[in-house]
Amino acid sequence: MIAVLSAGLWCGWFAWDTEYQYDAATGRMGGPYAVWQGVGAFLCSIVVVWFAYRLLHVAVALLVLPASFTFAWITTAAATDVTGLWMVGAVLLAFGTTVGVAMMLGIAAAVEAAGRKARVSAAASE
């Protein structure tokens, strides 16, 4: 379930958007992704990482989340890339998502520890 949710972050927020946009005012090409897509994916990833933290061992979550997101990316990138550079992108994406997931899992552990400490402190003061 966690792997499907992680892969769904790619598919739901990014995979469908393959168009670059031309900004006539600046004369620049942009895209294919918009800022709102990245923000939405990040906010949803907080929920997915929290579920993974609660349901899986941290080491398993650290393997499953980046691997499934990267695999979902590979399925779309490899299909359309004629240069073979999708492999470089996959390595960079795997590294970046692993670092990001590790940070988010660490934050989840810190939040849980702080909540546990607050509950113990509140119980002791009663």
Image (tube, rainbow, N blue to C red):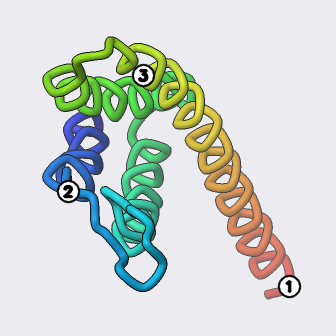
The dot on residue 90 is 3
Q: Which residue is mark 1?
A: 125
Q: SS for tag 2?
A: loop
Q: Position of residue 8 (x, y in %)?
A: 21, 46
Question: Which of the two labelled residues, at mark 3 and mark 2, occupies the earlier sequence position?
Answer: 2
* Disc 3 + disc 2, Cβ < 8 Å: no
Which part of the image, by quadrant, shows the N terminus?
top left
User: Which tag, 2 or 1, sits closer to the chain's start?
Assistant: 2
Between 19 and 47, the one nearer to me in the picture: 19
Where residue 79 sits, quadrant-wise, is top left
**Neighbour class for label 1 at 10 Å: few (<14), some, many (≥20)?**
few
What amino acid is labelled 1 in the image? Ser
- Residue at 50% x, 18% y: name it: 91
In the drawing, does residue 82 fall left or right of residue 16? right
Q: Residue at x 35, y 80 (%)?
A: 24
Q: Nearer the viewer, mark 2 or mark 1?
A: 2
Foreground label between 3 and 2: 2
